[in-house]
Image (cartoon, grey):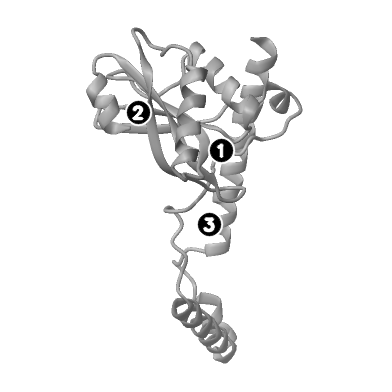
Amino acid sequence: MLKHGRAGVPMEVMGLMLGEFVDGYTVRVVDVFAMPQSGTGVSVEAVDHVFQTNMLDMLKQTGRPEMVVGWYHSHPGFGCWLSGVDINTQQSFEALNQRAVAVVVDPIQKLVIDAFRLINPQTMMLGQEPRQTTSNLGHLNKPSIQEMLNLAIKYSKAVQEEDELPPEKLAIANVGRQDAKKHLEEHVSNLMSSNHVQTLGTMLDTVVF
C-alpha cells in the first residue's frame, strides 16, 4: 500500500485488500493488489468490478484462498478521512460484507494510515453505541502468569499486615497515598460522561442534518 501510494503521488490510487476475518474482532490482511485507476481530486474513481472479478478468479486458480476484506486508497498530502465518494464506495463494500474495512494512506505526511467503517444512522437514532475498536491486539499487553502470582502474593501479604496493625496505626497507614479504587471510579465516571455527551451529539447531528 505504501509503495503504491508513493508511486501515485500527486494522484490518488486505490486497491483491494485480501485476507480473512479471524473472529468477531480481528481482521487479518495478508496481501493487496492495485486497481487500474486513479483519482484527480479528493476521491478516487469507482471500483472496476470487472477487473476485481477477473483478479479474484486468477488468484483462486493459483490456490490463494483469501477473500476481499476491504479496500484502500491514498490521500497524498491532505490527511486520512473519507470523502463523499469514498463513503459511497465503502457502502457498496459493506453491502457485500458488513465488516469490510476502508483504509486511507497518506504517503506524504509521515506515512499516516487510518482504517474506517461506516456508522449506521439507524443505530445512532436507536441510541446504540457503535463499536469503535476492532481489536486490542498490539495495544493490550497481558501480564504473565508469574506476574499474576506475584500480585496475588503481594495482596495476601498486604491484607495480613493490615490485620496485624493496631487501630491507631491502621487509621494513618494510607495517609498521603492515592486510593486506587476511588481513582478508578473517578476516571470511569468521567469517561462515561464524555462518551454519553459524544453519543448524544452524534444522535442530534444525525437527526438534524
Q: From this viewpoint, is residue 53 visible?
A: yes
Which element is circle 1 on? loop
Q: Quadrant of residue 167?
A: bottom right
**Quadrant of the frame with the C terminus:** top right
Q: Are marks 2 and 1 in contact (CB under 8 Å)?
A: no
Taking the spot 55% from the left edge, 85% from the top edge, the residue there is 156
Mark 2 or mark 1: whose residue is earlier in sequence: 2
Q: Amino acid at mark 2?
A: Val
Instruction: Give the alpha-carbon distance from disc 1 to disc 3, as whole Å.
Output: 25 Å
Which mark is on residue 183? 3
**88 on left or right of 59:** right
Give whichever of 185, 111 is nearer the camera: 111
Query: Residue 180: percent from the left, percent from the top?
Result: 52, 63
Which element is circle 3 on? helix
Which mark is on residue 172? none
Query: Residue 151: percent from the left, percent from the top?
Result: 49, 78
Mark 2 or 1: in front is 2
Query: Residue 126: percent from the left, percent from the top?
Result: 76, 28
Reading the image, the residue beneath label 2 is: 105
Taking the spot 44% from the left edge, 77% from the top edge, the residue there is 147
Reading the image, the residue beneath label 1 is: 132
Query: Would you place residue 120 above or below residue 65 in this image?
Result: above
**Are there few (<14), some (14-19), or many (20+) residues within 10 Å of tag 1?**
few
Q: Amino acid at mark 1?
A: Gln
Taking the spot 57% from the left edge, 43% from the top edge, the residue there is 190
Query: Would you place residue 190 above or below residue 104 in this image?
Result: below
**Are there few (<14), some (14-19), or many (20+) residues within 10 Å of tag 2?**
many
Name the residue at the bottom extreme.
164
Give whichever of 162, 16 is nearer the camera: 16
Mark 1 or 3: in front is 1
Instruction: Give the alpha-carbon distance from disc 2 to disc 1, as whole Å.
Output: 19 Å
Which element is circle 2 on? strand
